[in-house]
Image: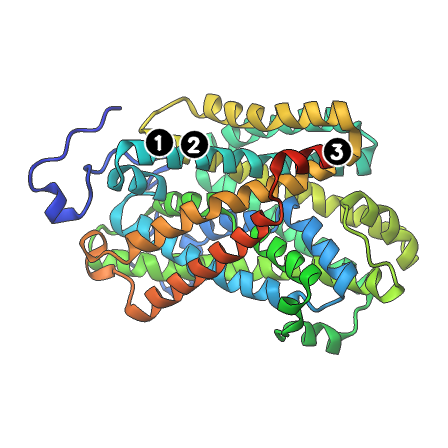
Amino acid sequence: MKSAEPGPTSVPSSGWRLPKAAPSLAEVHRTIAVPKSLGFWRKLLAFSGPGYLVAVGYMDPGNWATSLAGGSAFGYSLLCVILLSNLMAILLQSLSARLGIVTGRDLAQACRDHYSKPVAVTLWVLCEIAICACDLAEVIGSAIALNLLFGLPLIWGVCVTALDVLVVLYLQNKGFRYLEALVISLILLIGGCFLAEIIFSRPEISAVLGGFVPRWEIVSNPQMLFLAIGILGATVMPHNLYLHSSIVQTRKYEQNAEGKREAIKFATLDSTLALMFALFINAAILIVSAATFHTRGQHDVAEIQDAYKLLGGVLAVPVASTVFALALLASGQNSTLTGTLAGQIVMEGFLNLRLRPWLRRLITRLIAIIPAVICTALYGAGGIAKLLVLSQVVLSLQLSFAVIPLVIFTSDRRKMGEFVIPVWMKLLAWLTAGIIVALNVKYVADFSGLSARLAKLFG
């Protein structure tokens, strides 16, 4: 569908360079009714769902390696970094939901309608690279889990993950609520698995609570700072900002000031509750690692496969390793479901290009699977684990290009009208953006000399 050219009064009246095009994910746009007569709890239930699809990205396999390494190396000290990252995520996701609800544009469409075509295309390319890197992490995580649980060779496990395209298509055709229900069920499975792991590992409660208190050592210790930056880089995902701004529009709320205000309130509450659950998952990974490995002098457990092999033996609970791998499989599959949606939103939003959903998702999955298959065939388990780390570096590179436009758009009164974010939130948003940019620049700088780094990783 080709967008119409903006009229002579469109820019001063709306603040956008181009008029609004058709919504992304048109097949599910405004398909879930939210009757005005519902009470608070039933209305919260009606709005609940998008936040949990977003929360999936904050507990994906890309987070596991950094949390495992942080827990085994430094005990509970980096729990405060997980908490800080989660608070940043809550703020950014609330801005993303606000943008989608108020303007009727997702973040990708907003970038296309605000920036010149060359800038928008550049942002699209960067975002596609980030989505492929994120999808790669999910594919690898699922393949590792299948290998650990069923002994399936990694290369076959990578290929099997392509089948999630069929699951997404089937559930979305039945209704978006079915997809949300599957994702929430898998999140509950992950949470249950890690609750069991915490019980098995029996951490010291006072030490856990002390870990949520920030300490200067995190900044002064280069190794601790490196892992802290890695946790932040793996937690705040750029594709989630595009995803959330689109899927909040699946709710059929009233298109007036009162309806939008109520939608913002419930969408923010939905994502906040979901991200607090993600906080529990991420903290649990680090807590289990600290209680199991750090307290026993094993300070260099960083790879998922190593943690799996050690868990059952160290805890003297054989089922602990199986529960760990089951949680990993649920995490990987959950993340691939939402990653394919994000890919469709980004392509449709930036390019206003409509492909059949099955074709768009298949393209996204193949782009992630091909490098994973090649790396697995050439380098085996060691190579695929290092590719997982490298994917997080690529995500860090792209994050700023999603966060900064989001803050700019939601701070612009011409675009947001009466729903422009207040000054205190604007200051907090820019502070968050600044911290993310600075830490991720530092993170990427540690991987400078990319060709040499790649040679070292895969040589």
Residue at image mark 2: 125
Q: How is the image coloured?
A: rainbow
Estimate the spatial distance between the alpha carbons at disc 2 and disc 3, rounded to whole Å.
26 Å
- For label 1, the crowd category at 10 Å Cα-Cα, with few meaning under 14, some 14 to 19 and many 20 or more, is some
- N-terminal of the pair, mark 2 or mark 3, is 2
Which residue is depicted at the point 71% across and 39% down?
A: 386
Given the image, on which type of amino acid does mark 3 rest? Gly
Is label 1 in contact with label 3 (beta carbons under 8 Å)?
no
Measured as percent of width and height from the top left, residue 50 is found at 45, 49
Given the image, on which type of amino acid does mark 1 rest? Val
Please, what secondary structure does the residue beneath circle 3 have? helix
Estimate the spatial distance between the alpha carbons at disc 1 and disc 3, rounded to whole Å.
32 Å
The image shows residue 456, relative to residue 82, as above or below, that is: above
Residue at image mark 3: 383
Which residue is depicted at the point 61% across and 34% down?
A: 136
Residue at image mark 1: 121
Estimate the spatial distance between the alpha carbons at disc 1 and disc 2, rounded to whole Å.
6 Å
Given the image, on which type of amino acid does mark 2 rest? Val
The image shows residue 118, relative to residue 199, as above or below, that is: above
The image shows residue 250, relative to residue 281, as above or below, that is: above
The image quadrant that residue 387 belongs to is: top right
Judged left or right of residue 293, residue 52 is left
Is label 1 in contact with label 2 (beta carbons under 8 Å)?
yes
Which residue is depicted at the point 18% across and 54% down?
A: 414
Measured as percent of width and height from the top left, residue 289 is found at 77, 59
Would residue 384 be seen by someone viewing this image from the given angle? no
- For label 2, the crowd category at 10 Å Cα-Cα, with few meaning under 14, some 14 to 19 and many 20 or more, is some
